[in-house]
Amino acid sequence: MGTPPPVLVACAHGTRNATGRRLIAELALAARALRPGLQTTAAFVDVQPPTVVDVVGGLAEAGTPVVVVPLLLSGGYHVHVDIAGAVAAHAGAQAARPLGPDLRLAEVLHTRLVEAGADPRDPNTAVVLAAAGSSDPRSVADVEDTADLLQRSWAGPVTTGYGSAAQPTVPDAVLAARRAGAERVVVASYLLAPGHFSDKLQEAGADSVTAPLLPDERIAAVLLDRYDAVAAP
């Protein structure tokens, strides 16, 4: 028998929102369904247990190799400090890159926009890509890259807005889009699941707000690709 593959530790931010918790759990299960026999477990960087430090430490003490995949859409503090620190202490632990940017995530965003009634062919419909936000410029660059990917399939302008720690805020980005001449402004929720920030988007002044990315089978495929990039020999 060959060596079993590393355990996939799906590491999310964490949320108090019950629907958000369920969707994150279902994402890990979807990855397991796509890859029968793969062992997966969950960890979090904030809000809810178990912490990524505890999960990685426990598996490492048992001699189990681990690949932590950040269930995060950009590379900010949680990726470069929290998760990186959790794996750095253990020789058998590695970290993959976050889910975004990825063309498939832009395709899911496009789907959500159409579901919200937005017309991708209308040059007067502006999109504000709404991300949680980070003070880490690498995270902001990842969000900007995602906006560029979405722009490929959108006739109107695609700009970015943030919930915290980065500028412009989502309401400011919506206002700027209107001042630039947009007849309709739609906020595209660049969030995996419902939670505190997605609730606040309803107050940003847009004509409509899309649903978060989950559930969508394309995201489970991205998750497995991130794992494979590290776990594959």
Image (cartoon, rainbow, N blue to C red):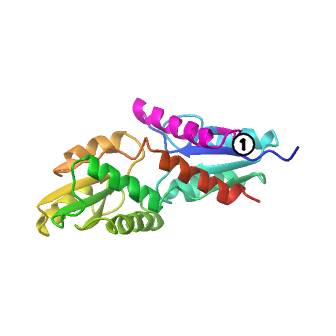
Quadrant housing residue 183? bottom left
Does 50 sit left or right of 73 as displayed? right
Q: Residue at x 60, y 51 (%)?
A: 224
Residue 25 in the image, given as x and y percentages of width and height: 52, 35
The one nearer the camera, 232 or 134, is 232
Main secondary-structure element of the magenta-colored stretch: helix
The one nearer the camera, 53 or 1, is 1
Instruction: Residue under label 1, please give it.
Output: 57
Residue 101 in the image, given as x and y percentages of width and height: 47, 62
Image quadrant holding the N terminus, namely top right
> Can see residue 188?
yes
> Tag 1's secondary structure?
helix
Does 25 sit left or right of 147 as displayed? right
Image quadrant holding the C terminus, namely bottom right
Q: Residue at x 43, y 41 (%)?
A: 215
> Of all residues shown, which one is farthest toward the right?
1
Is residue 83 depicted above or below 180 in this figure?
above
Residue 24 in the image, given as x and y percentages of width and height: 49, 38
Residue 210 in the image, given as x and y percentages of width and height: 28, 47
- Is-magenta flag for residue 26? yes
The one nearer the camera, 122 or 202, is 122
Q: Residue at x 78, y 54 (%)?
A: 91
User: Which portion, as a residue range, is magenta?
Assistant: 16-40
> Of all residues shown, which one is farthest toward the front?
121
> Of all residues shown, which one is farthest toward the top?
18
Q: Residue at x 71, y 39 (%)?
A: 37
Number of residues whose C-alpha sits closer than 10 Å to that of mark 1, classed few (under 14), some (14–19) or many (20 or more) = some
User: How many numbered marks appear?
Assistant: 1
Residue type at numbered disc 1: Gly
Does 67 sit left or right of 128 as displayed? right
> Can see residue 132?
no
- Is-magenta flag for residue 201? no
